[in-house]
Amino acid sequence: MRAQPNQLSYSESGVGSLTHLAMALFLKRAGLQMTNVSYRGNAPALTDVVAGHLPTMFSNIADAIPQATAESIRLLAVSSKERAPQLPDIPTVAESGFPGFNVLTWNGLMAPAGTPKDIVDKIAAEIGHSVKDPQFAARLDQYGVDPLGNTPAEFRAMVAADTQLWAETVQSLGLKF
């Protein structure tokens, strides 16, 4: 790749998407250059990797696992800090030589800014209780989701850290959207 800068391409699920930014961050840390090919969503981007039109991408785990099981793609690494429970034999990007690489797709429940704290805390407690239910946790696991059930303060800190990481990444890479 170093001998052929910008001659190889990667797919991503949309300009500014997590799959785009994760690859841009990875390439910067690895000192590599590739051309991004934007798609309207993860499924079409992954479809072109499966078809061999593009050699690589960061994909969400829920879409990647069925393709890997069918041996349509080869999983190289997961972008989380720790190995994914669904893929215990697949190393992390950090284990593969890029310490500190930790990119996660997450979903969170939010409420309007003026929502009373006691209501927010009650909803968060119910969600925290739900993600500990074995049947619900097993269902989430099928989709490659690791249930956190964190507190509003922990969630706020996670959002703030991600906002800072991606703002710095976009700025340092000179990405324009």
Image (spheres, rainbow, N blue to C red):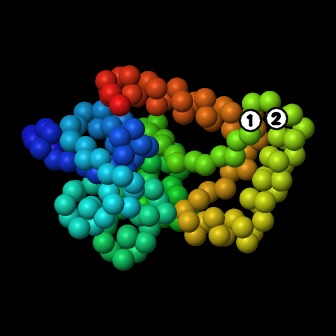
Identify the residue under disc 2. 115
Q: Position of residue 10 (x, y in %)?
A: 25, 49
Q: Amino acid at mark 2?
A: Thr
Q: Is residue 98 left or right of residue 51?
A: right
For the N terminus, the image quarter is top left
Helix, strand or loop for disc 1: loop
* Residue displayed at 74% across by 59% down: 131
Q: Amino acid at mark 1?
A: Pro
CB under 8 Å between discs 2 and 1: yes
* Residue displayed at 39% across by 38% down: 16
Q: Position of residue 123 (x, y in %)?
A: 82, 48
Q: Nearer the viewer, residue 111 or 93?
A: 111
Quadrant hosting residue 177: top left
Helix, strand or loop for disc 2: loop
Q: Which mark is residue 112?
A: 1
Q: Position of residue 49 (x, y in %)?
A: 27, 61
Seen in the picture, residue 36 relative to 142 is either above or below; the reply is above
Q: Residue furthest right?
A: 118
Q: Is residue 97 visible?
A: no
